[in-house]
Amino acid sequence: MTEMRKAGAYAGVLLKASLFAAVVAAAPFAGVFPVHAQAIVASINGDPVTNIDIDQRMKLLRVLRKPATREAAIESLFRDRLQIHEAEKYGVNPRDADISQQIVQTATDMNMQPQALLAAIQGAGVSEDQFKSYFRANLAFTVLVKALNKGVEASETQVRAELEKQGGKAAAGTSYTVQQIIFTLPIGTTPASLAVRAKEAEQLRSRFSDCKTGAEMARTLNDVTVRDPLTRSSHELGDQLRQLLDKTPVGHLSPPQRSTSGLEMVAVCARGPAKDDTAIRQTIAQKLLAAHIQADGERRLKELRDRAVIVKTAP
């Protein structure tokens, strides 16, 4: 990508490393799998691939909704070997705890929960070592390619061109000015006390008609926190929150929802076309950078594959 230039560090990891241990603990893998005769059927740069490796990879690819032919499994295993060896050359060797990043991202791409994905892998008969090697290889190579592209970001010209494709200023989306109101709950709240607080929250909601007077009313109530108003564009919000804000009339409160802080409601103080395109420009820049890194990774893998010494036995 000729217009990429140095400017800042790429975004960090997706999740805390501790998630992997929690997810695996929730869906433990069987310790013993059927034992079959193992035979080497291929190798790449002297690293062997066995018939059991291929069988396991075909099962995993089916769960991941990818082509799962024997040849596709072999190529996937070759890819793993190349990724791991290249990452190790630079000292990149993810721990088991780090693999959560790849599991969660894969599950998200498949519209699944991480626990559900692991359960499906287990149900397909894929061993823990086999599925870990797949995710470890992907993670290690991703970390390496990001490191090799550290300080690179999309140029202003690229962002402007992509913004124009999306409609220029019109692509800025919707701007929301909101104010959060929280009915705090004591530790160990009983169902009865929760019902009382929920009724109080609904009473405020029924009387709330604009942010100024509504916030003043809320401040007179016991154990109620009123946050300062803030403005966000639709590009900075998740789909669920954006849909909630769109359903809530301007000047009114959203229905109370239980959270770790208590019963939370959001007042929509203003809603309209976003005048500032900063958020959409940042989103575009992130997508362009992600595409650049993906393309660079594929390029590097192709070069490694082209130079690799591959031996295959007759099927």
Image (tube, helix red, strand yellow):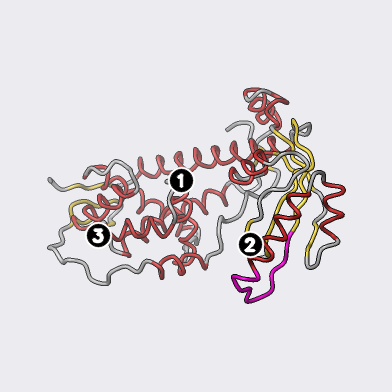
Labelled disc at residue 156: none
Q: Residue at x 35, y 69 (%)?
A: 28
- Looking at the rendered structure, the secondary structure element under dot 1 is helix
Q: Give the left or right position of residue 150, taking residue 228 as reference.
A: left
Which quadrant holds the N terminus?
top right
Alpha carbon distance from label 2 to label 3: 38 Å
Q: Residues within 10 Å of mark 3 (few under 14, many from 20)?
A: some
Q: Residue furthest bottom?
A: 188
Report the Cα–Cα distance between label 1 and label 2: 26 Å
Q: Is residue 189 magenta?
A: yes
**Direction from residue 114 to residue 227 in the image, left or right:** right
Question: Which amino acid type is marked by label 1?
Answer: Asp
For residue 103, side relative to residue 230 (left or right): left
Q: Which residues are magenta?
A: 182-193
**Mark nearer the N terminus (1 vs 3):** 1
**Residue type marked 3:** Gly
Where is residue 110 shown, x and y percent of the image? 42, 46
Question: Are the two marked residues, 1 and 3, in contact with CB atoms closer than 8 angstroms?
Answer: no
Q: Find disc 1 in the rendering and name its residue.
A: 109
| Mark found first going from the N terminus, 2 or 3 | 3
Residue drawn at x 59%, y 43% as measured from the top left: 239
Q: Report crowding for label 1: few under 14, some 14 to 19, many 20 or more residues within 10 A (C-alpha).
A: few
Residue 125 numbered tag: 3
Give the residue at mark 2. Answer: 259
Secondary structure category for the residue under label 3: loop
